[in-house]
Image (cartoon, rainbow, N blue to C red):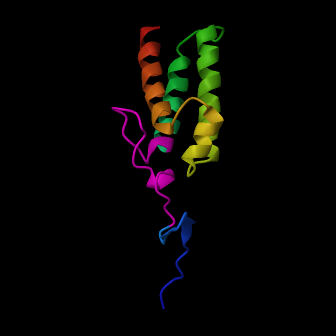
Amino acid sequence: ASAPVALVVVGQRFFSDGVIPGVGKGKTSTGLVGLAVDHDAIPKMITKYNALLLKAQEMPPTAQYRINVEKICNHRIAAATAHPDDPEKVEELCNCGQVEELVQQADDEMVVMEMY
């Protein structure tokens, strides 16, 4: 006997794998030119924002830039850690774009930190 299959209904379409087109694992486009969908964006966020926290340790503890970077990183890491399988929730909590954009923002911030 095979395992029961859960069906997800979207409009009049049925999806036996639970993947909803355009949402989560069913996302096929960010809608942004040059920014591809990345289904591994949340683990990448955690890794990259932790790297930013380590890099920030090189700055004086009273530097306002360090303080601000640490607050942003800690907030985004907490959101990503709390909702590892829900990119839409991470996006809602971070309120700074799609998870793919949040990964790009971490990369961009590291470039800026290298200049500090």
Q: Give the residue at x 55% y 74%.
A: 6
Given the current orientation, which residue lies at the most extreme front position? 12
Q: Which residues are magenta?
A: 18-42
* Of 58 and 46, the residue lying toward us: 46
Where residue 32 appears, as percent x and y from the top left, is 40, 33
Taking 90 as reference, is 9 above or below it? below
Taking 108 as reference, is 7 above or below it? below
Q: Give the residue at x 40% y 49%.
A: 28
Taking 81 as reference, is 116 above or below it? above
* Of 20 and 57, the residue lying toward us: 20
Q: Is residue 63 left or right of residue 103?
A: right
Where residue 25 appears, as percent x and y from the top left, is 46, 54
The prevailing secondary structure element of the residues shown in magenta is loop
Given the current orientation, which residue lies at the most extreme bottom position? 1
Tag count: 0
Q: Is residue 109 magenta?
A: no
* Of 13 and 48, the residue lying toward us: 13
Q: Is residue 6 left or right of residue 78?
A: left
Q: Give the residue at x 59% y 27%.
A: 73
Where residue 16 appears, as percent x and y from the top left, is 48, 72
Name the quadrant containing residue 9: bottom right
Where residue 63 appears, as percent x and y from the top left, is 62, 8
